[in-house]
Image (cartoon, rainbow, N blue to C red):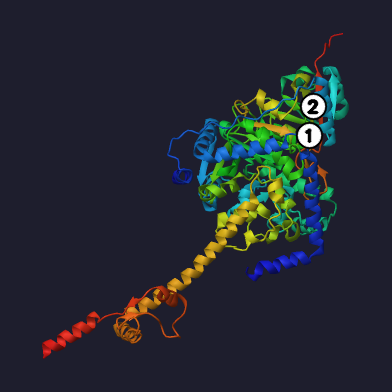
Amino acid sequence: MIAREHILHKVRTALGHSAGRAAAPPPPARLRIPAWEFGERWKRFAAALEKLGGKAVLAAGAAAARQYVATLTGGRPAVASAAPALAAWGITSLPGVRSEFRDDAELRSACASADFGITTAEYALADTGSLALWASPEQTRLISVLPPVHVALVPASGLITGLDELLTLVPRPLENSSALVLVTGPSRTADIEQILVRGVHGPGEIHVIVVEEREERS
Amino acid sequence: MTNQPLVRIRETLGDARLQEAIYAATGRLIEHRRQVVAPEALPDYQELREQARRIKEHTLENLDAYLEQFEAEVRARGGEVVWARDGAEVADFLVELGRRSGARLIVKSKSMTAEEIGLRERLEAQHFEVVETDLGEYIIQLAHERPYHIVAPALHKTRYEVGEIFSQKLGVPRENEPERQTRIARAVLRQKFLAADIGITGANFLVADCGAVVLVENEGNARLTTSAPRIHVAVAGIEKLVPRAQDLAVFLKLLGRSATGQPLTVYTSILSGPRRAGERDGPEQFYVVLLDNGRTRVLAERDKRETLYCIRCGACANHCPVYRRIGGHNYPWVYSGPIGQIASPQFQGLTQDPWLPFASSLCGACAEVCPVKIEIPRLLLELRAEVVKARTRERQNRWERAAFRLWAWVMTRPRVYEALSLAAGLLASEEAGPNWLRRLPALLNAGPLRAWLDYRDLPLPGRSFRQLWRRRTAKVRE
């Protein structure tokens, strides 16, 4: 408490302010949103992600998305989040995929040993090839960071132009969650002789499936 | 300049291997940056710099209000804000927290602020196991060195040296391929993440309107540091604030590009408070330590305040012809390169390393590439002027002190004083009359005494009190 008052006092003295003074209005925020059609957004997203060594997939409907994930995982152990979309798209019922856990400890150890972590993402950012993931009761933080491969499914409506649009849609991003993470490609380092190595602590492989919600019924 | 820094600099200059490593690494960083800020890649780059500078200026001018807003927003999300005047107070808080929560193992992600206050060493001295988790920083920790560069701490180490360090310190078979070395570090550190009690991070930004700590990184170690342990403590300088989450649109675009040439780094974590109700992982306790450690002093210097705008991208070092030759370990403090040259004298005092602001050709490359447009060459000139002023003052003070010591010596010895008054009487000059002193004999006629007498005549001392007293008592006795 002493340190708090002391630091605030020094800040005010440095600035010539008295206590309780409100901040002057900040310069207007600078947010620019380009007018890109879906086709343009997809093209840019795929190019940006693949340049980083990630894989971008456009799935014509849930069945195609499910098929892609099934082929990729091939029955090997995967942890899927409890996001409703993953169940609705039939991802959680694929062989090898677990999405229900007795308790937090079991969920954590499953994440630590799984080959794949499967999540949804609320948004994908076209210009940088990024995903926006919020921590939530359904979708925990560790699913997308502990397993060596991260698979993310994004509804086509969530493919937006970029960071500026994200912060326009969600100007206060931590109202209902303790964490928002932007994921841009696979985990990497260049700390040794600036040689690129993927998969340091996070996933070395990332697959983003943008799911177009078309009529599924035949 | 004392000789020590010069000797070390000559060693660096004479080390061909090291010269090549520094030059190649900074050269690649220059090229990566150039590609992503070029007009065809980012047409509004200059506007973004302008906006970033404006926001930093505004935030610092209203820092008291933003600090209080930040604190209230963190509390509203269930977190705690701790204020620390210096490194010792940060360590005191963490030691107390560690004891209270029965913590033993601490994982840490890279933080220049933590380096600045020697946090790891302070905690190790209190018997905590503290593990750096950024690959470069981990190598540096094992080698017992300090970071070579703000964003690339192990820039000076070859893969062979890394292989040697790993096999010696971790007892693993020697491995010279960065790919395999990375696997080794991943396996060792994975166990640490899962077993750790406390995760310590810095903060690239603090966001006032949502009480958030923002961390940018590429490896995923900051994500794990802030997600796996049950306690997260972020240590951040008070200058890291920005007003709104929306301002991140500007700063994130500039930071990744300027530092490593990435439009966005791989992971950007925006965090506030402990896990919310229902969330199944993430920390149970969340603390932000707001550190002063000299920042309020810099804030008070209006014309040099912009030193605090720095977002620690390291671009100034990469482009600096001096840094590219002398490397990161020849700067006296943890902040190397041009930003270190203006930050160190202001944080640590001018007299600590007075040569530092002079070790520059003032070519201006640093200011050209700075994402928040800090006028580093101007600040170097200001600091040079201050060094010179301080030296002059120091010289004057030496003479003044000597003169007063002499004065005191004379004044406390009545006999000497009397003798000197009599002697002064002998110097009376003819032309000004017997009671005036106009010129000194050749031997004394120099320096300030001569300057004084060139324009003034000095009345000679009359009889002193003691003389008068002696005469009086003699009369009475008669």
- Estimate how packed mark 2 is, as few (under 14), some (14 to 19) or many (20 or more) residues with alpha carbons within 10 Å: many
Q: Position of residue B193 (x, y in %)?
A: 69, 43
Mark 2–mark 1 contact, CB under 8 Å? no
Kindly give the residue lying farthest to the top in the view shown: A218
Does residue B356 appear to the left or right of A118 in the view shown?
A: left
Q: Nearer the viewer, residue B56 or B248?
A: B56
Say which mark, if any, is on residue A114: 1
Q: Quadrant of the N terminus of chain B?
A: bottom right
Say which mark, if any, is on residue B340: none
A62 versus A6 height, above or below: above
Q: Secondary structure at mark 1?
A: loop
Q: CA distance from mark 2 to mark 1?
A: 9 Å
Query: Mark 2 — on which chain does it sit?
Result: A
Q: Quadrant of the C terminus of chain B?
A: bottom left
Q: Position of residue B286 (x, y in %)?
A: 57, 38
Are labels 2 and 1 assigned to the same chain?
yes
A60 versus B273 height, above or below: above
B195 versus B126 height, above or below: above
Quarter assignment of residue A178: top right
Say which mark, if any, is on residue A97: 2
Residue A207 shows up from this direction: yes
N-terminal label among 2 and 1: 2
Residue B126 shows up from this direction: no
Tell me which residue sits at (65%, 34%) in the image.
B248
Q: Nearer the viewer, residue B371 or A190?
A: B371
Q: Position of residue B220 (x, y in %)?
A: 73, 40
Q: Position of residue A135 (x, y in %)?
A: 67, 29
Does residue B299 appear to the left or right of B4 in the view shown?
A: left
Tell me which residue sits at (56%, 47%) in the image.
B305
Tell me which residue sits at (36%, 85%) in the image.
B427
The three-letter amino acid code for the residue at tag 2 is Val
Quarter assignment of residue B325: bottom right
